[in-house]
Image (spheres, helix red, strand yellow):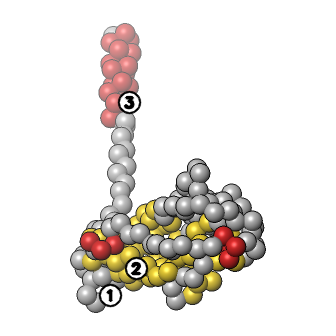
């Protein structure tokens, strides 16, 4: 009889240990605002600075005139209140807030400077961000300006080409 009691206690002990095992499942996620559509006139834009003389950009801090550009988003969903953009592109060696000339045999000593139209002191270089509110018509517009800028002087003649990438986050 003592062996039966011991065996019964072991079986009950094992059953009780199975009854106390718990499992936990954690589920996480993030709900984000839906994207707007890019206006067809904003998809791919070219700013032509026409012909500039290298002698006009020979001193550090000299620049061309500003050229305005607008990037317009349309048909934003009602749940989207604002759009933030992060700028990216090849940084100029002389100043990381400027965009480099991507032509290997192009003009040297100059770079592209991008800023906000309303305040050209607010430079939008690689890694910077800007936010635009979605208006009552469900549109958001980024008003920008660009110019060729000589950060260190000693500009040489040649062609210039640079690309500014904009990654958008909808909120």
Residue 138: x and y in percent read 27, 83
Discs 1, 2 touching: Cβ within 8 Å = no
C-alpha distance separating marks 3 and 2: 68 Å
Picture disc at residue 135: 1
Asked if 81 appears above or below 31 in the picture, the reply is below
Counting residues from the start of the chain, the first of labels 3 and 2 encountered is 3
Residue topped by disc 2 = 70
Secondary structure under the numbered disc 2 in the rendered image? strand
Judging depth in this view, the residue of 144 and 75 nearest the camera is 144
* Quarter occupied by residue 23: top left
Residue 35: x and y in percent read 30, 68
Discs 3, 2 touching: Cβ within 8 Å = no
Q: Nearer the viewer, mark 3 or mark 2?
A: 2
User: In percent of the image, x 68 and y 62: which residue is there?
Assistant: 156
User: In percent of the image, x 59 and y 51: which residue is there?
Assistant: 105
Residue 55: x and y in percent read 70, 73
């Amino acid at each position: 009889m003592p062996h039966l009691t011991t065996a019964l206690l072991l079986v009950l002990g094992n059953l009780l240990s199975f009854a106390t095992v718990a499992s936990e499942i954690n589920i996480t996620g993030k709900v984000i605002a839906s994207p707007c559509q890019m206006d067809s006139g904003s998809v791919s834009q070219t700013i032509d600075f026409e012909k500039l003389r290298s002698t006009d950009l020979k001193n550090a801090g000299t620049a061309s005139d500003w050229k305005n550009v607008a990037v317009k988003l349309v048909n934003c969903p009602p749940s989207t209140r604002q759009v933030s953009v992060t700028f990216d592109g090849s940084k100029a060696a002389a100043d990381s807030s400027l965009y480099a000339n991507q032509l290997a045999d192009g003009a040297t000593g100059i770079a592209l400077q991008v800023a906000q139209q309303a305040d050209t002191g607010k430079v939008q270089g690689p890694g910077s961000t800007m936010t635009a509110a979605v208006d009552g018509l469900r549109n958001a517009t980024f008003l920008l300006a660009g110019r060729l800028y000589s950060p260190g002087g000693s500009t040489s003649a040649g062609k210039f080409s640079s690309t500014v990438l904009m990654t958008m986050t909808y909120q």
